[in-house]
Amino acid sequence: MSKYWRKKVEWAPAGTTNWNDLGELHTDSDHSPSAEAEETSSGTELYGGTEDVYEIPVYDKTKEAALRTIMIADDKVDLRFTDVEDNTEIEQGFSVIVTGAKNFTPRQRETFNARFRRSFL
């Protein structure tokens, strides 16, 4: 179980404070920070930057249109996480990818997946 579980998630267009509720991070949410490395032909490892990705299933289809608009415009968003003790953390500069839910689950709820990704060099 991730340390991010049960945090409230909100998003806003980058650089603004117009926060939009996205729901909560659940156990089926995913957060995967990673460091990338590349190797030259001689075997020397080069630093390729880091990547921070949140994949969040969203259970309210009315929130999909606004995120799709951000995705199509290739704009960035900021994310705000609030835990059960009202501690708030803001992370900035994410690109958005919105996809439909995986429909292989019986009695699937109306959902979509929001993937937030940022890279650092």
Image (spheres, helix red, strand yellow):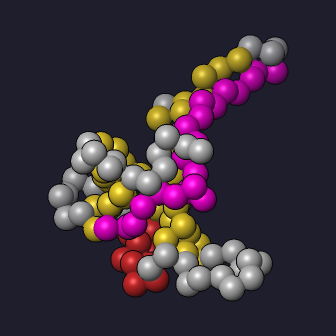
Q: Does the magenta stretch include residue 93?
A: no
Q: Going by the picture, which residue comes out furthest to the front?
A: 85
Q: Quadrant of residue 40?
A: top right
Q: State the residue at coordinates (39%, 52%).
A: 7
Residue 121 appears left or right of 67 = right
Q: State the residue at coordinates (63%, 76%).
A: 101
94 to 65, vertically: above or below = above
Q: Is residue 33 magenta?
A: yes
Residue 43 appears left or right of 100 = right
Q: Give the range drawn in magenta.
A: 21-41
103 to 75, vertically: above or below = below
Residue 59 appears left or right of 22 = right
Quadrant containing the N terminus is: top right
Q: Going by the picture, which residue comes out furthest to the left?
A: 17
Q: State the residue at coordinates (55%, 38%).
A: 33
Q: In which quarter of the image is residue 13?
A: bottom left
The answer to whether one can see residue 90 in this image is: no
Residue 83 percent across, percent down from the top left: 33, 48
Residues 25 and 45: in front is: 25
Residue 95 appears left or right of 108 = left
Residues 52 and 59: in front is: 59
